[in-house]
Image (tube, rainbow, N blue to C red):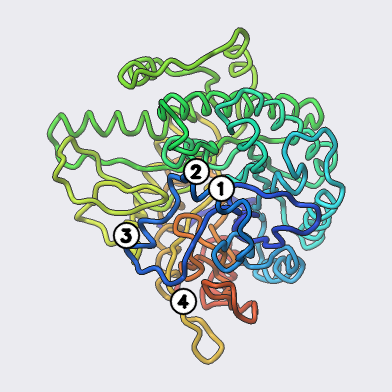
Amino acid sequence: MTNKFPENFLWGGAISGSQADGGWNEGGKGLNTQDLRYFDADWNRAQRDENRNINMTTELFNKALTDTDLEHYPFRWGNDFYHTYKEDLRLLSEMGLKVFRTSITWSRIFPKGDETEPNAEGLAYYKSMFEEAKRLGMKVFVTILHYDTPVHLITEYGGWKNRQMIDFYVTYAKALYENLGDLVDFWLPFNEINASKFNPYNGASIIKDQEENYEQAIFQATHHQFLANALAIKAGKEILPDAIFGGMIARFESYPATSHPDDVMQSILDENYTNYFYIDVMARGKYPSYTKRMFDSKGISIVIEDGDLEILKANTIDFISYSYYMSMVSTTSKEHEKTSGNLVSGNKNPYLESSEWGWQIDPVGLRISLNQMYDRYQLPIIIAENGIGARDVVEDGKVHDDYRISYLNSHFEQMAEAIADGVEVLAYTMWGIIDIVSCGTIEMSKRYGVIYVDRDERGHGSNERIPKDSYYWYQKVIETNGEDLSY
């Protein structure tokens, strides 16, 4: 098949503020939850996997509140985008990037999270960044909350399980619309909203050892985020009538391990509970019928106040976005081999190869997921994240990353197939377009970018930017609008 992408297809790249910015205590910024994630560069592979802070503890949290040892908190230094954004955006523009996705750090705008007036210096930073992106010809795709909740909202209010968070979040969103709205093309209220389930500290600011009923806290927090998502859309449409709002999940494609009916049924349940539930609420405006059994089986009874369901129904999303890195296998067998993934572990597929970090590489799964999501919701789709983490080596001032080009090539081919299938795909924003600190393992050595950043796992290095071979390959792809994927 000839690779055919729409004439106005948006080839892009994505980062998050907490993984890139640095400047953790500059410009009036307050502490956020990502600033508290601890990492030791001397950990071996097993220790790194074990200490990913998927479940933050009270002991680690309290220690980090006063710890000023930057080496052990990589999210505090990132790749220094806070100071280099003009140079970085220029490099992206020279590559031909059509859309740039980043997140706004809540604690830069409201340092504690519960103030009534925003921090002018934080707003000025994003205004300058977005104006620069626009000047260079790129559209701006903004994530309002990408895991980094102000710490004060956890210590004072308990995080997203507290309903007061909705009002704090909407106040924050309104400040963005009023001050930056004319510079933003696509709004995304929450990054991977299903992270509240598979990574509760990142997704919902929940510390496991503080909860009597962990699952109850998770789903109550999720309900509050659904309401915050809907009310942010409502406020956005009132302030910016032409604004476009999406909903995002981390997409975990699930295949039955065998043709045994039990495995097939398990695949359906995994898809519903892990993927569709979250988009069902945001796109259809209501809790799907299957959630009753899910909640009953877990002994969960979330508090839904009068008017909540009407809010969800009246304020649905305009487009769907999701991260896609790998697929998983569904089975009722307890003996099935496990493998790692995007902040989760799952069952291994024997037909797929894996990255060094155990993420299974499945380009066809992207086409499958695009077809499934479009068939179910009939809404345009943005692939908000996709890419491969790898150890890149600088040789004679260059980075030869054929493995990344191969990964992107195969996924672009399958994205083209999905478009030929009739799926409306608006944009693709490659994850970690510039090397950033990995969210999952807090490593700098797990690199995703097409631009190398000379910084090691202790934050040391020249911080020089070096375009990789994949940079020039992606430049050609964008220039030909996906017609030429050769390498």
Distance between the Cα atoms at labels 2 and 3? 29 Å
Residue at the disc numbered 3: 358
Q: Quadrant of the N terminus?
A: bottom left
What percent of the width, then of the height, locates residue 385?
A: 52, 52
Marker disc for residue 58: 2
Residue at the disc numbered 1: 62
Point out the tag, 2 or 4, that comes first from the N-terminus.
2
Residue 12 visible in the picture: no
Distance between the Cα atoms at labels 2 and 4? 35 Å
Q: Amino acid at mark 2?
A: Thr
Distance between the Cα atoms at labels 1 and 4? 35 Å
What percent of the width, then of the height, locates residue 43?
A: 39, 68
Point out the tag, 1 or 3, that comes first from the N-terminus.
1
Q: Amino acid at mark 1?
A: Asn
Q: Is residue 361 left or right of residue 83?
A: left
Point out the tag, 4 or 3, that comes first from the N-terminus.
3
Label 4's element?
Answer: loop
Point out the tag, 1 or 4, that comes first from the N-terminus.
1
What percent of the width, then of the height, locates residue 463?
A: 64, 77
Instruction: Pick whichever, 193 or 384, lies toward us.
Output: 193
Q: Is residue 58 left or right of residue 337?
A: right
Q: Amino acid at mark 3?
A: Gly
Marker disc for residue 392: 4
Label 1's element?
Answer: helix
Label 1, residues with CA under 10 Å away: few <14, some 14-19, many ≥20: few
Q: Quadrant of the C terminus?
A: bottom left
Point out the tag, 2 or 3, that comes first from the N-terminus.
2
